[in-house]
Amino acid sequence: NSPRKNQPFIKVNCAALNENLLESELFGHVKGSFTGADRDRIGRFEAANTGTLFLDEIGDIPLSTQVKLLRVLEEKEVERVGDHHPFPVDIRIITATNRNLENMIKKGNFREDLFFRINVFPIQCPPLTDRKEDIPLIVENFINRICTKNHKPILGISSEAMETFLEYHWPGNVRELRNAIEYAAVLCTQGIRIPEDI
């Protein structure tokens, strides 16, 4: 029922970019603002205007970029890198991290004011090791997605393979589980069950 539901939904993986690239990705840049900036480029804030910006792994954002992010959230305006003409943005921000931001604040690695700005409606998702009962459903979901995406019928997973999944501690959480399923799906022949020796 959100008025933003039909507006842009833009995702940024903050852990995938270094500090300079992240700033350019988030805020955009003007031509000549740095080596290689051969044209103006809009940032993700501008692309998400009137919609939603999802900042995945916000705990990986450097402190210097956190300051700029906080300014955008407080003032609701963005300046492209190399520009001094802010423009207004109207966006909803959703953030996620696998880090403990409160511990990072204590160590001086995350700004407390930014934390309170983004921590309006927190949803805690326990790690996969704390919710092993979800693993069969998650595995089934990933198998269905892979079958659809790759047009490859996989009849399911053997009970031995499922037992292996349930016993493993999954330090990489759901992403690691997804990768294991994708790996097994590549190795299995069409129309057979994923073998237990994944």
Image: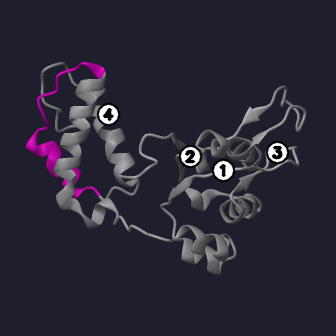
Residue type for callout 1: Val
The image position of residue 55, as x and y in percent, is 55, 52
Residue type for callout 4: Glu
The image quadrant that residue 108 belongs to is: bottom right
Quick one: SS at disc 2? loop
First-in-chain label (2 vs 4): 2
In which quadrant will I find the C terminus?
A: top left
Looking at the image, is 24 positioned above or below residue 89?
above
The image position of residue 159, as x and y in percent, is 9, 44
| Tag shown at residue 50 | 2
Quick one: SS at disc 3? loop
Mark 2 and mark 4: Cα distance apart in space: 35 Å
Mark 4 and mark 3: Cα distance apart in space: 39 Å
Q: Which residue is the site of mark 1?
A: 89
Depth check, front residue: 149 or 38: 38
Q: Is residue 12 visible?
A: yes
